[in-house]
Amino acid sequence: GIVKTFPGVRALRGVDFDLRAGEVHALVGENGAGKSTLTRILAGVETPDSGPMLLASVPYAPRSRADAESHGVRMVMQELNLIGNLTVAENIFIERLPSRLGFIDYRRLNEAARQAMAKVGLGDIDPATPVKSLGVGCRQMVEIAAGLSRQCRVLALDEPTASLTDSEVELLFAQIRRLRAEGVGIIYISHRIEEVLHIADRVTVLRDGRIVGTRPAGEVGSEAIIHM
C-alpha cells in the first residue's frame, strides 16, 4: 500500500511489492511509471506518504540512505554517485577507507579495489586513476563495483546496463547470479525486456503508479509484458 505524491504528481498509488531472498525481481514500465520512486523509498532516499514496509518480517522505515544501508539495503542509482576528483579506489571504498597510523593505507585500498574491479571487468584499470578521466561506461562499472563490493541483503539496480557494452553486461549478470546464489534479494529495473527475461526470476509491471501484475519470468514473454 505504498503511496508517494510529489507536487502535482501522484507517483505511487497504493503499491504492493515483495522481494524474496535469493531472487532477481525485475521492475518494468514506461518512464514515469514509479519504478525509481519505489526503489528510492526502499533505499531510504525518499519517504513514503503512507504504507508500511517489512524487512525479514520486521518493520522497516529508513530515515536516510545511510540508515537503509545499515540494514543491508543498497541501491545503485541511474544517476552516478561518483566524485570525479577522487580515484577509482577512493570512490569504491569511500565509506570505509583502510587506514594505518591515522593515514589512508593506499596499498590495501588499491588491492581491495583491484579485486572489486576485476569482478566487473575493470582489472586493467589502475585503481589510482581519477574517475573524471574515465568514459561513461567505465564510470557506470565503477559505480556497480562499489555497490557489489558492499555486504547487502537487498540490492536495487536502476538501469545498470544503460551505458554498458555486451561484454560488460555479461560480467554484471555473472555478479548478479553470484549474489543471488548467496541469498541476496535483487531488484532490477530496466527498459530492455529481453535482458529482463534473461536475468530475472519474477517480473512486476508498474503503470501510472500502480502494479499491473507480477509473473514468473519463465512464464511470460516480451509481448505479454509490453501489453501489461
Image: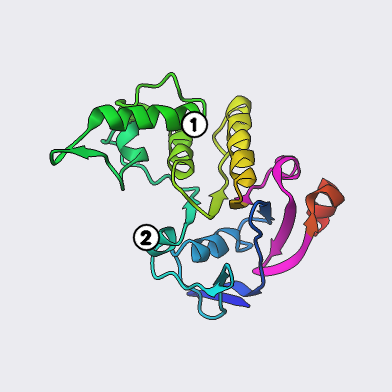
Q: Classify mark 2: residues with Cα within 10 Å, few (<14), some (14-19) or many (20+).
A: some
Q: Classify mark 1: residues with Cα within 10 Å, few (<14), some (14-19) or many (20+).
A: some
211 lies left or right of 35: right
Label 2, label 1: how far apart the Cα atoms are: 26 Å
Q: Nearer the viewer, residue 75 or 135?
A: 75
Kindly give the residue lying farthest to the left in the view shown.
Answer: 101
**What residue lies at 63% left-to-right and 36% top-to-bottom?**
173
43 lies left or right of 216: left
Label 1 element class: helix
The residue tagged 2 is 66
Q: Nearer the viewer, residue 100 or 60?
A: 100
Kindly give the residue lying farthest to the top in the view shown.
Answer: 124
**What residue lies at 61% left-to-right and 25% top-to-bottom?**
167
Count of all numbered marks drawn on residues in the image: 2
Label 2 element class: helix
Image marks 2 and 1: residues in contact by CB distance under 8 Å:
no
Label at residue 69: none
101 inside magenta stretch: no
Vertical position of residue 193 compared to residue 56: above or below: above
Q: Position of residue 42 (x, y in %)?
A: 52, 64
Say which quarter of the image contains residue 52. bottom right
Quarter the C terminus occupies: bottom right
Q: Position of residue 203 (x, y in %)?
A: 73, 55
Kindly give the residue lying farthest to the bottom in the view shown.
Answer: 50
The residue tagged 1 is 137
Q: In the rendered structure, which disc, 2 or 1, sits on the residue that comes first in sequence?
A: 2
Q: Position of residue 110 (x, y in %)?
A: 31, 28
- The magenta span reads 188-214
Q: Position of residue 214 (x, y in %)?
A: 76, 62
Amino acid beneath label 1: Gly
